[in-house]
């Protein structure tokens, strides 16, 4: 019985490890401090500033689908439609789109207020959230 | 110590479990290996394409050296597009294509909407149309000048009833954002009452229906509300825990009525009376996330003039009301209510009127069928309404559907039935004009895009 329980725990741990290995991260320039709700607000166009700092959200084409599904509970169609409305009504620009993790990380590292999402964090950026 | 049969069974089950896990892991590893192999092949193909294009660019550069400076950049842009296309997964859908467009924007992008279609209406329709129509080409710019200074400029091109083309400066607003709670705009803007006017306005592809509710139509298309304003507008949103409060407060030139239309006095105000307005919204979260409810109101003094400039009437306008919208994955709905308590400046008599609409749509994949009800119950003696061409009581029911071809384009159809009450209106020169009332039907098709 004890061994059966141990096996179950090991399987669960293995599953968790695999799941964690699949997790992407939201990264930011070290000047940025945001919680998960604020990250969501930022990508929904409901937040542009953190204190006096102008935030600069970036989309990552490689990871857009998973980000929208896991963080915004949305999809490309709704996300595009939402930003079209936002831009038309409020005059705010949709997040710029980068092609790869390397491009996102490099932009985030050198731009105050920048926020992006990548497979794994690199030196010089802050991890805000795993998803 | 001996193993019991139960212990043996447990070990056996655990071993089977571990074996399943290992098999799954192996299968997963195989799947990953296949995926990597496919990606390597795709990368190899892309590299070959880039090499071919680079060679072609060099060849063209040699051929056109010193004669056509624009050609290499055009070819380079083509090569860049080809590289991007090579990067895009074969399964990329239209939404990804829209994102792809956004990736390559630089400078100040030009956004816009356009629509074409056809309308048929029965003989009693005062704005009878039968045949194909060109809708509006709406272009807007949102240049960013830094962290806080911004601008929104919009021009609409359309054909008027007379068939002549016209270009209207829809919006020309310059803003300064202090923080998320306060942006101040100056210039000409869409008056922020209700939701429809600022959410959709000329963005045909943004709205599910083809036509706006009639009383929220543009001033030059028979709308009876001041949907444009020239002045100052403060707007913002404040997060209160999980909820959000939005607000708008504005002061603008008071409208006038000329040629039976509302004129927002964009060049300058005709008198010292200003329009004051507010809009206060509430957006909860949790189980009812997607709901917006709010209250709004505006007040002004509106004078009607003859073409020679003589004043026909002066009305103190007071309007207040409420609105809601609710959007989920499956449903979308929007409704607005306006209550007018206008006073005639000459007689002091008060006239009460009300207008409302409610629209509900159901999202079934890319298809959204909808139904909308509109009512306008206007006091027939209110000079604010009866000096306007469409200042008549009516009720309308519309049904239709919108099919999204992709996030940036859709095909729609709409059927509506309208019943109007008889009323005595006042024409441009101040003469009473009887309107007999009646009922009519209208059918319309529209193909709309956003870009």
Image (cartoon, helix red, strand yellow):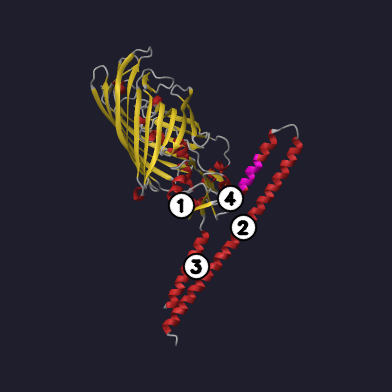
In the image, which disc is placed on residue B395? none
Q: Residues within 10 Å of mark 4 (few under 14, many from 20)?
A: some
CA separation, marks 3 and 2?
Answer: 27 Å
Question: In this picture, is B279 found above or below B259?
Answer: below
State the residue at coordinates (39%, 19%): B269
Marks 2 and 3: in contact by CB < 8 Å? no
- Between the C-alphas of marks 3 and 4, the distance is 29 Å
What's the chain of the residue with tag 2?
B
Name the secondary structure under disc 3.
helix
Label 3 and label 4 in one chain: yes
Which numbered disc, 3 or 2, marks the residue closer to the eye? 3
What residue is pinned by disc 4? A100
Instruction: Determine the chain carrying the residue at label 3.
Output: A
Could you tell me which secondary element the residue under label 4 belongs to? loop
Q: Name the residue furthest bottom.
A: B1
Q: Nearer the viewer, mark 2 or mark 4?
A: 4
Chain label for disc 4: A
In the image, residue B240 lies at what x, y percent? 36, 45
Q: Main secondary structure of the magenta part?
A: helix
| CA distance for labels 2 and 1 | 28 Å
Which residue in the structure is indicated by mark 1? A71
Which mark identifies residue A14?
3
Residue A4 coordinates in the image, percent (x, y):
44, 76
Could you say which is closer to the camera, residue A24 or residue A81?
Answer: A24
Q: Give the labeled residue for mark 2.
A: B38
Specify start and end residues of the magenta stretch as a single range. Answer: B77-85
3 and 4 marks in contact (CB < 8 Å): no
């Amino acid at each position: 019985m004890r061994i059966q329980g141990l096996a179950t725990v090991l399987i669960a741990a293995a599953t968790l490890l695999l799941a964690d290995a699949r997790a992407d991260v939201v990264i930011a320039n070290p000047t940025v401090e945001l919680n998960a709700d604020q990250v969501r607000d930022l990508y929904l166009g409901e937040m542009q500033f953190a204190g006096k700092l102008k935030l600069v959200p970036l989309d990552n084409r490689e990871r857009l689908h998973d980000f929208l599904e896991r963080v915004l509970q949305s999809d490309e169609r709704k996300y595009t439609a939402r930003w079209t409305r936002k831009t038309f009504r409020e005059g705010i620009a949709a997040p710029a789109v980068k092609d790869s993790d390397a491009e996102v990380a490099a932009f985030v590292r050198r731009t105050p207020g920048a926020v992006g999402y990548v497979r794994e964090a690199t030196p010089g950026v802050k991890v805000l959230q795993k998803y | 110590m001996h193993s019991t049969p139960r212990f043996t069974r447990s070990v056996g089950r655990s071993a089977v479990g571990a074996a399943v896990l290992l098999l799954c892991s192996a299968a997963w590893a195989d799947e990953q290996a296949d995926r990597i192999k496919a990606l390597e092949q795709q990368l190899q193909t892309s590299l070959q394409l880039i090499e071919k294009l680079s060679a072609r660019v060099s060849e063209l550069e040699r051929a056109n050296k010193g004669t056509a400076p624009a050609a290499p950049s055009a070819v380079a842009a083509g090569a860049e597009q080809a590289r991007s296309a090579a990067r895009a997964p074969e399964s990329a859908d239209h939404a990804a294509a829209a994102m792809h467009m956004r990736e390559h924007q630089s400078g100040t992008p030009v956004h816009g909407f356009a629509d074409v279609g056809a309308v048929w209406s029965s003989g009693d329709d005062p704005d009878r149309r039968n045949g194909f129509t060109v809708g509006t080409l709406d272009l807007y710019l949102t240049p960013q000048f830094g962290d806080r200074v911004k601008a929104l400029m919009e021009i609409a091109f359309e054909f008027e009833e007379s068939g002549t083309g016209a270009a209207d400066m829809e919006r020309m607003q310059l803003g300064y954002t202090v923080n998320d709670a306060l942006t101040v705009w100056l210039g000409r803007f869409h008056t922020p009452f209700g939701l429809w006017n600022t959410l959709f306005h000329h963005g045909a592809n943004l709205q599910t229906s083809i036509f706006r509710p009639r009383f929220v139509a543009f001033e030059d298309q028979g709308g009876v509300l001041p949907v444009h304003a020239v002045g100052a507008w403060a707007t913002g949103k404040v997060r209160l825990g999980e909820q959000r409060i939005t607000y708008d407060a504005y002061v603008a030139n008071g409208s006038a009525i000329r040629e039976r239309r509302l004129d927002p006095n964009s060049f300058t105000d005709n008198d010292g009376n200003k329009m004051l307005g507010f809009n206060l919204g509430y957006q909860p979260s949790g189980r009812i996330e997607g709901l917006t409810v709010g209250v709004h109101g505006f007040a002004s003094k509106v004078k009607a003039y003859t073409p020679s400039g003589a004043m026909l009437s002066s009305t103190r306008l007071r309007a207040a009301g409420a609105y809601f919208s609710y959007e989920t994955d499956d449903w979308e709905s929007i409704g607005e209510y306006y209550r007018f308590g206008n006073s005639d400046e000459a007689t002091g008599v008060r006239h009460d009127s009300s207008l409302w609409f409610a629209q509900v749509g159901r999202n079934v994949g890319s298809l959204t069928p909808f139904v909308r009800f509109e009512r306008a119950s206007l006091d027939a003696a209110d000079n604010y309404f009866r000096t306007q061409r469409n200042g008549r009581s009516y009720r309308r029911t519309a049904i239709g559907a919108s099919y999204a071809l992709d996030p940036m384009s859709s095909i729609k159809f709409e059927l509506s039935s309208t019943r109007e009450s008889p009323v005595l209106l006042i024409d441009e020169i101040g003469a009473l004009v009887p309107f007999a009332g009646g009922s009519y039907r209208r059918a319309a098709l529209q193909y709309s895009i956003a870009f």
